Amino acid sequence: MDPPADALAIQLPPTVERTAGSLWHNPGFLKLWVGETVSEFGSQITQIAIPLAAAVALDATPAEMGILSALQMLPFLLISLPAGVWVDRMRRKPILIAGDLVRGIALLSVPVAGITGHLSILLLYAVSLITGAATVFFDVSYQSYMPALVEREHLIEGNSKMELSRSAAQTGGPGVGGALVAVLGAAEAVLFDSLSFFFSAAMLLWIHKPEPRPAPPEQRRHMVHEIREGLGVVLGNRVLRSIAATTATSNLFSSISFATLFLFATHDLRLNAFQIGIAFALANVGSMAGALLAGRLSGWIGLGNTLMWAIFVGSLADLLVPVAGPATAMPLLFGSMFLGSAGSVIYNINQVSLRQSITPDRLQGRMNASMRFLVWGVFPVGSLIGGALGTLIGVRAAIAVGAVGGLVTVLWLVFSPVRTLREPPPPWERPEGGAEGRPSD
């Protein structure tokens, strides 16, 4: 069964320093935060520059653009689960450093090819696939590394600071990226993202806090068994299972709506690319607001209530899109994205912190990888459903289906133990062969 509310006192890993006050006094976290902030801004440049390099410099076809986009997500479906096993078998910081270096080197090939006249769509395919694979390992390791770097009671603060940087990058990064592409060229602008990954790796090297020692090789089992154990951690605990179901359902219906959103905005709402870009940029202010409020809301109304209200308000906001018309397009689109972004960030910060807090260190990698596999695997499914619905019943109706369907998402939390949580319960272990877990000792 799940750990009761009055379970044993929380046992922090011995490597976690008990810092006073906030994370401003934790030098290891600050180095990770600075490196990630710079890297996030660099990544926003690449998200604009690489598609523009394909579309403009290489005159790519729609099919080639689709392949380029798919290759960035493909590693999350193919290697997330084994990546979780490898992350749990090794120390996380070296994996983070290797992930940054691999991405930096791969991206460096783009400006070099652009300068020397050897840029090709095949090169962009390879870079997208390699950086996507490195990102899988980095993301799983990063979420698993955080509990060893900060105290348990500072996890929400740490994730909030990281999300605030990500939101700031999403707000200001596209404008900077567009300016660099205009001045330097699309391929050459990728150089700045390459350098940002090298900077992030340097900051990680500067962190000296030790990590918990991974299990010795003689205690390891076959990878398939360890993958099953990781999935069992998520599916065998009611708290983690409800979080996975909530997030996957939300992602499914949001991807149904998003599949035809740009067609709806340009054809039905008659917005141009500049107006759509402005709406997205301004809406990211909602992400920043959510990052600032996530910890405070959890303290005011409790963790469970925060998760339920955040996901419900975000779902309600989606209803503003299908009722928009040309005259109301900008305010309704902005309002939907602002509230949706704020709700999503508040939900994500708190649910990631809950997952990190409740899971024993030896299972962090596999838990995070299993979560990523389960909740991101629905994206291509939702996109295909959204495209099919848009063809059969029209894009406005397809977006409405996704928006209305998203309202059921919160029910996973309402009928789960998460609803009553004031704060994260203590870590628990899933016994061998058991269906549920017990508090760790």
Image: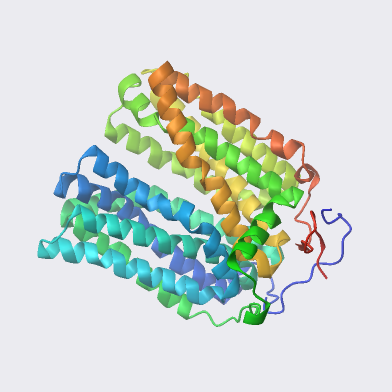
Q: Position of residue 345 (x, y in %)?
A: 56, 46
Which quarter of the rendered picture does the C terminus lie within?
bottom right
Q: Residue at x 57, y 35 (%)?
A: 314
Residue at the spot x=73%, y=59% of the render?
Answer: 358
Colour scheme of this structure image? rainbow
Q: Is residue 311 left or right of residue 441?
A: left
| Residue under the image location 25 percent in, 44 percent down | 64
Closer to the camera in the image, 398 or 432: 432
Residue 348 can be seen, yes or no: yes
Q: Is residue 319 visible?
A: no
Which quadrant of the figure has residue 362? bottom right
Residue 239 position within the rendered picture, expressed as x and y whole percent measured from the top left:
74, 49
Q: Residue furthest left?
A: 117
Q: Residue at x 28, y 34 (%)?
A: 273
Return the x and y of residue 224 as percentages of the image width and height: 60, 62
Is 305 located above or below residue 386 in the figure?
Answer: below
Q: Is residue 327 above or below residue 145?
A: above
Compare residues 323 and 8 and report the one nearer the observer. 8
Indicate left or right for 148 with 8 as reference.
Answer: left
Position of residue 417 in the picture relative to residue 324 (left or right)? right
| Front residue of 430 and 400 | 430
